[in-house]
Image (cartoon, rainbow, N blue to C red):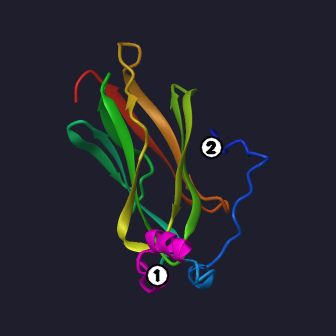
Amino acid sequence: MSDVELDEPVDEFYKAPEKKTVAEIISADSGDSALDRYKASLLGNAAAAAQTIIDPTDPRIVLPKTLEIVHAGGVRDSIDLTQNPEGASMKLKEGVQYQLRLGFNVQREIVTGLRYLHRVTKMGITIEKESYMLGSYGPRQEVHHFNTPVDTAPEGMMQRGKYKIKSKLVDDDGHEYLVWSWNLEIAKDW
C-alpha cells in the first residue's frame, strides 16, 4: 500500500493483552465458574476449539472469506476474499442505506483486537478513512461475521462514479491477514 497508507494512529494508553494459547486460557483459573462460563461463550467446546484448523496449508490465524454490501433487501453484492480480491468491484445505488459485512474464519488460536481499516479515494483525493474494531474471536469451524454500522451512500450527480478503496484486516499483534484494493461504483440505479 505504497500510495495510501492505512496505519491507525497509535493510542499511547492502549496496551494489547498478553498473547496466550487456547490451552493456557482453558487451564487458567479453572475453579472460577463465572470465568469458565465466559471462556465457554468465547471458545464454545474448548477441546474442539484448540484443534480447529480450517486450512492446514495456511498458517494465518484469521482467514478472510467475504466482503458483502448488505441493505434492507439483503446482500446486494460481494467479493470473495479467498481468491485474489485485488481490483474487484461492487456497485451501490446512490442514497441507499447499507452496511459492509465481513466474513472470516478463525483457526488455531484466539485472535485479539481484530480490526478492519479502509481508505476511500475518488480521483486520488481521500474521501473517507475508517477503522472498525471487530473484537476478539476464538477458533471455530463456522464463519464469523461482522457488520459495520449503517451508512448512507452519497447521492447526487457529483457523488456518482467510481471510488477506489484500500482495505486491511489486522490484529493487535500487527499481523496483517489481508491487504487489498477494490472498487465501488455509486450509480443512479442498481
The answer to whether mark 2 and mark 1 are in CB contact below 8 A is no
Choose between 73 and 43: the one closer to the eye.
43
Give the label, 2 or 1, closer to the camera: 1
Vertical placement of residue 8 versus 37, above or below: above
> Picture coordinates of residue 3 (x, y %)?
64, 39
Q: Which residue is mark 2?
A: 6
Choose between 128 and 179: the one closer to the eye.
128
Q: Determine whether, in the image, residue 149 is placed left or right of residue 188.
A: right
Q: Which residue is mark 1?
A: 46
Name the residue at the right extreme: 12
Q: Is any part of residue 83 visible from this angle?
A: no
Look at the magenta stretch and give its main secondary structure: helix
Q: Quadrant of the C terminus?
A: top left
Question: Which quadrant of the structure image shows residue 160?
Answer: top left
Magenta-colored stretch includes residue 44: yes
For the residues marked 2 and 1, what is the alpha-carbon distance in whole angstroms?
Answer: 35 Å
Choose between 175 and 166: the one closer to the eye.
175
Q: Amino acid at mark 2?
A: Leu
> Picture coordinates of residue 170 (x, y %)?
58, 56
Going from N to C along the chain, the mark reached first, 2 or 1, is: 2
Span colored in magenta: 33-56
Q: Residue at x 36, y 18 (%)?
A: 155
